[in-house]
Image: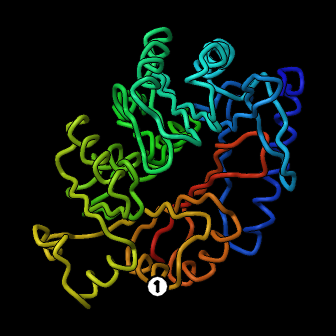
Amino acid sequence: MTDNQYSAEQYQQQLNIKVDTYRATVANLDFPEIRVFPSQPLGFRMRAEFRIWHEDGQAHYAMNRPGEKRPYIIDQFPIGGPLITALMTPLLEAINNSVLLSRKLFSLEFLTTTSGQVLITLIYHRPLGEDWQTEARLLQDKFSIGVIGRSKKQKVVLQSDFVTEILTVDGREYSYQQVESGFTQPNAGINTQMLSWASQSLKGSTGDLVELYCGNGNFTAVLAQHFDQVLATEISKVSVASARTNFAANDVKNVAVVRMSSEEFTQALNRERPFRRLADIDLDSYNFSTILVDPPRAGLDEDTVKLISRFDNIVYISCNPQTLAENLKQICLTHQIESAAVFDQFPWTAHLESGVLLKRKC
């Protein structure tokens, strides 16, 4: 990848194609005008994972093309954020200068923030001993970064396993703990736009919010201000812990988060079975008016579609237009689409994020 492969004109052309494809995918649904949020064409990606390819006695960054087993070596990554692109070359040089750091290294991951923090994970096909830790600490100190080493059944954290991102949404700063093994939005600029769109869409809401797939509380921390109470669910233990940390860091006091799947939450709401994880939560005390879902690419299963259709207001964040369109066919039997937006989270790929606000039909 090189900078001259990309231009503002080329970026707009590929975005237009994605938006046109999105419109065609939802053409049979009653959509209002769709707002389009473009990304920066370059320097937008805050995390990246590289394969390490060893050739001629040196380690190289490498990637795989779809369908090809042998990776190709890269020396530039223009879509990477400023901290990634600045560190790539000197970091790899330092690793190649150390046999302990380079030997059987097969992957390197970057996690960075707009607030200037960097965490790298070095993944190996060998156990990591005290000698590796000594060399890795020198690397950590040299570049003022955090370093984690991983191998089979081993994780070595030299300093910490997270970074802290600071995002400004509608004039207010939010602090987010982002853990190395947890999911985070890769495009901070687009993430901020998504949070602002969702917040503005729900401004003036009444009652309580329930959020499925809350992750580390990315949306929850911003949207909680519009509701009396919020109940957030998430299945990942790592994400639940981060969400609680982030609510405390942002002084969000009206949110309870529980570790359960959407299927389990449906069972709890229907009083089909008790859950010890809900022992301290009185579901009857909530006046749910709104639900937010941000499912994986597979979309929502049939039971979850039935669940969310019980709420007056629905915010559906989607990473897959095809499954969104399928889900909306059912949801739009009871709800109408009030607003819609697309967010170019992944420029130069076919992927397109979107958001839809639905309200119950009168």
x, y percentage for residue 326? 66, 77
**Does residue 253 appear to the left or right of 1 in the view shown?**
left
> Which residue lies at the image location 52% right of the left edge and 44% below the top edge?
194
- Residue on which the image places disc 1: 303
Q: Compared with residue 187, is residue 212 higher up or lower down, i.e. above or below?
A: below
Q: How is the image coloured?
A: rainbow
- Coordinates of residue 253 in the picture (x, y in percent): 17, 46
Residue occupying the point 67% across, 27% down: 80
**Up/down of 24 relative to 238, above or below:** below
Residue 145's quadrant in the figure?
A: top left
- Residue 226 in the image, given as x and y percentages of width and height: 30, 50
Mark 1 Cα-neighbour bin, 10 Å: few <14, some 14–19, many ≥20: few
The picture quadrant where one finds residue 328 is bottom right
Helix, strand or loop at label 1? It is: helix
Q: Is residue 346 left or right of residue 316?
A: right
Choose top left, top right, bottom left or bottom right for residue 155: top left
